[in-house]
Image (cartoon, rainbow, N blue to C red):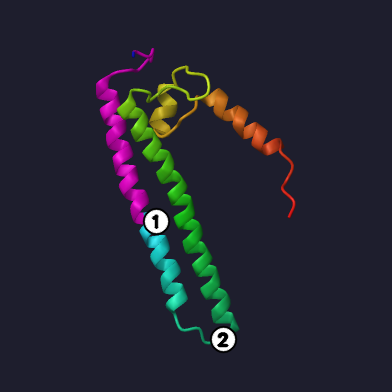
Amino acid sequence: MCHERGWQGNMKDSQFRQQLLEKRQELLARIGRGQEEARDSHVAEVEDSGDRVVSTEDKEAGFQEATQASQALRQVEEALQRIASGRFGICLACGKPIDADRLKALPWAALCLPDQQKIDQATLSRPPATL
């Protein structure tokens, strides 16, 4: 199955694959650090209410870091799967090639810029959720 890509080629795919593998390692390390920080802040002896607040904030920051890194890791893993399946660089929404400059900046991009902007705009115009 051949897909039209302006920058296509196995050489480019292998370069993107290497970038993605390096990013995956970086994210795995961040996830580990975030989880460790959250555990450490929980284990720390808490002296007073001020210390408890700081400990809670540290724990939340560690969990937030790990959550963001986990979401990014999922995108990187999906991009690696697209390389393996020959679908890397093809927009998942419209099927057109993703601009090479976009892939250089965000090798895990799954959408072309116009489709990503449509999603971003729809997200911004959505009313806030109520509890």
Vertical comparison of 15 with 37: above or below: above
Instruction: Name the magenta segment's main secondary structure.
Output: helix
Q: Quadrant of residue 81?
A: top left
**SS of the residue under disc 1:** helix
Pointers 2 and 1 in contact (CB under 8 A)? Answer: no
Tell me the tag on residue 31.
1
Image check: 55 left or right of 35? right
Q: At x 43% / y 50%, what residue is drawn? A: 70
The residue depicted at 37 percent of the width and 39 percent of the height is: 77
Q: Nearer the viewer, mark 2 or mark 1?
A: 1
Residue 121: x percent and y percent?
65, 32
In the rendered image of this protein, does residue 99 appear above or below residue 44? above
Q: What residue is pinned by disc 2?
A: 48
Q: Amino acid at mark 2?
A: Asp
Image quadrant holding the N terminus, namely top left
Q: Residue at x 34, y 43 (%)?
A: 23
Q: Position of residue 105 (x, y in %)?
A: 42, 33
Q: How far separated are the C-alphas under marks 2 and 1?
A: 29 Å
Label 2: element kind? loop
Q: Is residue 12 magenta?
A: yes
Q: Quadrant of residue 75?
A: top left
**Residue 24 on the magenta segment:** yes
Is 18 rendered above or below residue 47? above
Inspect the image, locate mark 1, and give the three-letter code of the amino acid beneath it: Ile
Are there few (<14), some (14-19), or many (20+) residues within 10 Å of tag 2?
A: few
